[in-house]
Image: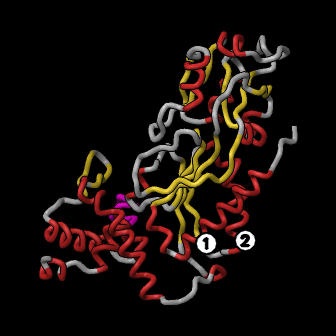
Amino acid sequence: MDLIKLSRISMKHLITLHVMLDTLSVTDCAQRLCISPSSVSKTLSQLRNTLNDELFYRHGNRLVSTPLARRLGPTVHQMISDMNQIMTQEEFDVAHYAGSFSLSMRESTFELIAAPLCEQVLKLAPNIRLDIWSKDNIGVSGLAKGVLDFIILPHDLSQPPNIDNNLVWETLFTDEMVCLMSHQHPLADQPLTIDNYLQYDHIGIVDNDLSVPFFELQLVQQHRKRKVMVNVADFGVAATLCKNTELLFTCSKKWAEVAAQAQLLIMKELPFNYGQVGYSLVWYQPSMNDPALRWLYQQITAVGQTIGRSTSVQ
């Protein structure tokens, strides 16, 4: 252990690195820490010399973190969290808590979860700030970097992703899958069978953090592969495409019941066994040491339980 080298790194350096990994901007980092940009630059320079790494470099018009900086992210995040608990040594007071939380979810999940979650959280903790990102902008890797606190996303429960052993995946609620189509679709007035389901072209959802959906594998094993002619990143875009085409879209039933994009579409049950699906809450395991994050976790799971108990109104 190099005590002399360690003595040159203070909480000021760690906090600056933590915020820089989040903002990737010297100006934004300075604003968040209420100091000048030159102070941020000076602290980063000291840390670069100590660690013998550039930490951040400019690529075009933006800053990019180095591999070492990204690897340090989770450890630094945990160290700051532990130090915060040591310094405060007081019970978490939700009514006066003025911190911020950062979540990420698919845009399609906003209508289903974000609205009731914001209503509940802001009612109990009026002084907090919620940063809710689209998963297209910040994915699962943001948890390990300390940029995100939680991610909420739909996926096949039969095939939980295995991206990082330090990530915890907890099912908020289970769901069914349905097939959406326009009212002008040739199948609109017919029972949906496996033959006519496979006869028509489909819209697929792509997600780089998840493996091939289990229902796709089931379909191939039991019948044959469906024809996916268009791939998009989100449910809402897929539903919009359905309205003016003969494409079929397979998605979450609970989302289809509440989403504005799906209201003018016909919903049919799938004619095959697709396994088990649901919405999961994902977080970095050490985060639960923070009482504020434990509180937010409780609010998210409570909202998930409410959604899970809801039934279709159609």
The range drawn in magenta is 21-29
As drawn, 246 above or below 101: above
As drawn, 170 above or below 232: below
Instruction: Name the kind of residue labelled 2 in the image.
Output: Lys
**Residue extending furthest toward the front:** 222
- Mark 2 lies on a secondary structure that is helix
Asked whether 44 or 178 is in front, the reply is 178
Asked whether 166 or 313 is in front, the reply is 166
Magenta span: chief secondary structure: helix
Residue 295, disc:
1
In the rendered structure, the answer to whether residue 102 lies left or right of residue 87 reads right
Q: Position of residue 240 (x, y in %)?
A: 68, 28
Residue occupying image coordinates x 15% and y 71%? 50
Counting residues from the N terminus, which is met first, the one under dot 2 or under dot 1?
2
**In the rendered image, which quarter is residue 23 located in?**
bottom left
Residue topped by disc 2: 123
Q: Position of residue 98 (x, y in %)?
A: 57, 77
**In the rendered image, which quarter is residue 246 located in?**
top right
Asked whether 28 or 174 is in front, the reply is 174
